[in-house]
Image: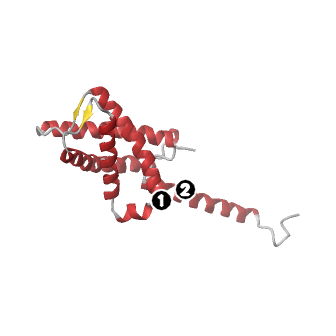
Amino acid sequence: MNEKDPKKPTDEEIQRLIEQLKKNRSGKNTAISFGFLLHRNYVVHMTFSLIINFLISAVVIGLAIGVKAPLIEMDIIGYILAIILLTLIENFVKILLFKYFMRILILSMGLLSVLTQIIILYLIDVIVTTGFHFPGVEQLIIFSFIFSGLRFVLSVYLRRWLYTKKIKFLEGR
């Protein structure tokens, strides 16, 4: 009865429109994901961020100790607290930056993110009074640049792995 009405779309047209909407929606999610998020599910993203921050910070600290130029004075409790705070504060601030200053972030080619991270790490140094301290501004800046670079590389590989493998149990739906 609806098939003869020329104003109403056919079932095939509706199917095509639904597929088009799905393609547009997934393209937008992928763009957002590649800009900041490691995963579409925010809890999974935060878990990955925390693990990556612990891993990369340990690598940077270990490399610095290996070349006999320690960047941080710390103990294990201060370190754990600082990395958890870094992950939480940085994710919150980056969401705000991506929402309100996306164009500036793109034009700065990541330098605004590193500057933001330097400020956050300085604040964490002030907040965590015992067990986590940068001896000088130079160490803070060196740590931030190396940390950001290595984290960027690892994050790109993680995103590539997640989105090319299409792992069913990790899909955030």
| Residue designated by label 2 | 26
Residue 161's x, y, as percent? 40, 47
To which quarter of the image does residue 65 belong? top left
**Res 164 visible:** no
> Could you say which is closer to the camera, residue 55 or residue 80?
80
Nearest-to-viewer mark from 2 and 1: 1
Residue 104's x, y, as percent? 39, 63
* SS state under label 1: helix
Going by the numbered disc 1, the residue's amino acid type is Tyr
Q: Residues within 10 Å of mark 1 (few under 14, many from 20)?
A: few
Up the image or down, 44 lies above or below 159; here it is: above
Q: Residue at x 35, y 49 (%)?
A: 157
To which quarter of the image does residue 66 belong? top left
Residue 121's x, y, as percent? 31, 43
| Residue designated by label 1 | 100
* Farthest bottom residue in view: 6
**The N terminus is located in which quarter?**
bottom right
